[in-house]
Every structure is written in C-alpha cells, then in structure tokens.
Image (cartoon, grey):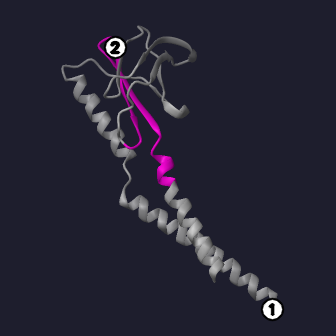
Amino acid sequence: MRRIELQLAALLALWLSAFAVQAHGLDVIAQHSDGQVSGLALYTDGTPAQAIYVALVAAEDATQVLDESKTDGEGRFVFAARADGGMRVIVEGEEGHRAQALVSDLPASGGSNATLLLLREDIARLQQHMWWRDLIGGIGYLVGIVGLWALWRSRQSGQAR
C-alpha cells in the first residue's frame, strides 16, 4: 500500500509542475492597416513580452527579413508595411521561446483600428486563461488513468492465483 501512495504522490507532483512549465509560453498577434503593421507579444500568463526581438518577414519566405525591432514596455511593436502584403511576424523571447503569426489585413473603414487591436488582445488573453473546466478536466483525466492502472493491476493479480 505504501508503494501506491508514493506513486500517487509522484503523479501529483508531476501534474502540479505542469503549471510552471505552461507559464512561459509566448504568443503574438499582428495586424496590417494604414500602411503599418502593429501588434502585441504576450506570455501565456498575460504579461507583456518586454524588450524582445521582433522580425517582420515575408509570408512566403521567412528568411527574407523585411524589418527588425524590439517590443516596448507593453509588449507592442510597429513596422512600416510592405506594399504587396503577405507578411509574417516572428517573435523570439527569453529561454528560446518563439512565436509567429501571419499578419492579418484590416479593411479600410471609418472605424478605429486601435479598437480592433484591443479586441484581438482580449481574445488572445482569454485563450490563454486557465479555466476551472480545464482544471476539473485534468483531474478527471488523471482519475481515469489511475482507474485504468488499478484495473490492470487487479487483472494481473487475478492471473497470478
């Protein structure tokens, strides 16, 4: 019985350490409007990716660098846009993290492009948020694995008799 308790404790420790690993992901959003490419780089915990490398590259050839810069204190960046479109933004953060996104073209309109960027930022933050349903689903997944292991062990002990 002691062995099972140790195995469950090790499994719980691995599960809890997964949250620390997830906290360092990097995401980027970018849009093209009014002759410029603007965007935002965020870590998965919602903090802005400050002062990290950002490259604007051609969508069809990532080796063709059109412009380079660093994010500001809020994780934002701005580039002059390419006339023929087809651009991609690559962000390289600390510890080797890298994210990329195709630059989406916004239609010319009388509305505010800054408002649209704020909406896209909110969507990106919501996608990175840890929801209760995710936590409960993870616990259910672990309970299912332990249940399959217990079934397998009971069948093995039945064959040994």
Q: Cβ–Cβ below 8 Å for labels 1 and 2?
A: no
As helix, strand or loop, the secondary structure at mark 2 comes to strand
The residue sitting at the top extreme is 83
The N terminus sits in image quarter: bottom right
In this view, the residue in front, 56 or 9, is 9
Mark number displayed over residue 36? 2
Instruction: Residue under label 1, please give it.
Output: 161
Please say whether residue 98 is visible from this viewpoint. Answer: no
Quadrant hosting residue 28: top left
Residue at image position (57%, 16%) is 61
Residue at image position (53%, 66%) is 12
Residue at image position (35%, 25%) is 39
Disc nearest the viewer among 1 and 2: 1
Q: Amino acid at mark 2?
A: Gln
Quadrant hosting residue 7: bottom right
Q: Amino acid at mark 1?
A: Arg
Q: Is residue 127 magenta?
A: no
Crowdedness near tag 1: few (<14), some (14–19) or many (≥20) residues, C-alpha within 10 Å = few
Q: Measuring from the top left, give residue 112's x and y in whole percent.
A: 20, 23
Q: Earlier in the sequence, mark 1 or mark 2?
A: 2
Residue at image position (45%, 45%) is 23
| Residue 1 in the figure: left or right of residue 94 | right
Crowdedness near tag 2: few (<14), some (14–19) or many (≥20) residues, C-alpha within 10 Å = few
As helix, strand or loop, the secondary structure at mark 1 comes to loop
The residues colored magenta run 18-45
In this view, the residue in front, 131 or 12, is 12
Quadrant hosting residue 6: bottom right
The C terminus sits in image quarter: bottom right
Q: Is residue 86 above or below residue 132?
A: above
Q: CA distance from mark 1 to mark 2?
A: 75 Å
In this view, the residue in front, 104 or 29, is 29
